[in-house]
Image (tube, rainbow, N blue to C red):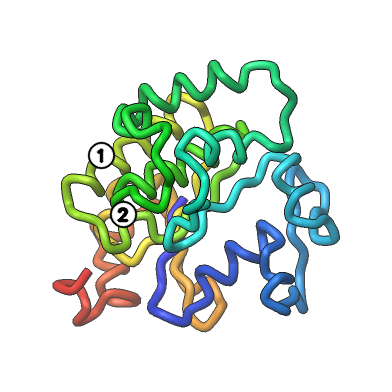
Amino acid sequence: MALLGSNGAGKSTALKAISGLLRAEHGRVVAGDIELDGRSVGDLDPAERVRRGVFHVLEGRRVFAHLSVEENLLAGAYTRTGRGIHDDMRQIYQYFPRLEERRRLLAGYLSGGEQQMLAIGRALMARPRLILLDEPSLGLAPLVVKHIFEIIQHINHTLGTTILLVEQNARLAMEVASYLYVLESGTVVLEGDPRLLALRGFIENVYLGDKRAAA
């Protein structure tokens, strides 16, 4: 699923409300509730939400710069026991061979694209059911973005992991998403199959407007 909207529409805030990180910024949910499998998780702290299967990949990657690539991946598995952790790490190295080549390197020395790969790999180490992915293409070269989005689609289609994607590149988001929400001032103003919405011109008329070239 993709969540689109202009700057300040509430996209990142929505993700932080779901993951529980909104409280860390002194924010709060004032109406409604956050539910997973029909059960409220609104009162759970972020760590417990990770245990329930929700992992948030923040905008700007936010890797642990002073830890190695491998230590970052292991940090993603902190809610798990030892069983299967190293098997999962090998799988992530198959997705992102460059991470294996740099596994002993401090994450702070990685390129932006490599840090984004590491942030996604760290999320996968938690074996999440839902990944909240905030602006994964931000500041990255087109070829790197293409590879990362291919992996995102593979994770969704092969592992069955749900992805909730916030992405300023509207066209890119619409290419990979199976369902789309458009936010305006914190309110959903449009939703549906992105291909049908694009075919009917709804996205251009309601959201993109004159920004289509910039997107």
Residue at 44% x, 32% y is 155
Instruction: Please say if 16 is above or below 140.
Output: below
Crowdedness near tag 2: few (<14), some (14–19) or many (≥20) residues, C-alpha within 10 Å = some
In the image, residue 19 lies at what x, y percent? Answer: 66, 57
Task: Name the residue type under label 2.
Answer: Gly
In the image, residue 36 lies at what x, y percent? Answer: 73, 47
Q: Which mark is residue 112?
A: 2
Residue at 74% x, 71% y is 23
Q: Is residue 115 left or right of residue 31?
A: left
The number of numbered badges drawn on the structure is: 2
Residue assigned mark 1: 147
Residue at 45% x, 38% y is 69
Say whether residue 128 is visible: no
In the image, residue 156 lies at what x, y percent? Answer: 45, 34
Q: Foreground residue, 101 or 32? A: 101
Task: Name the residue type under label 1.
Answer: His
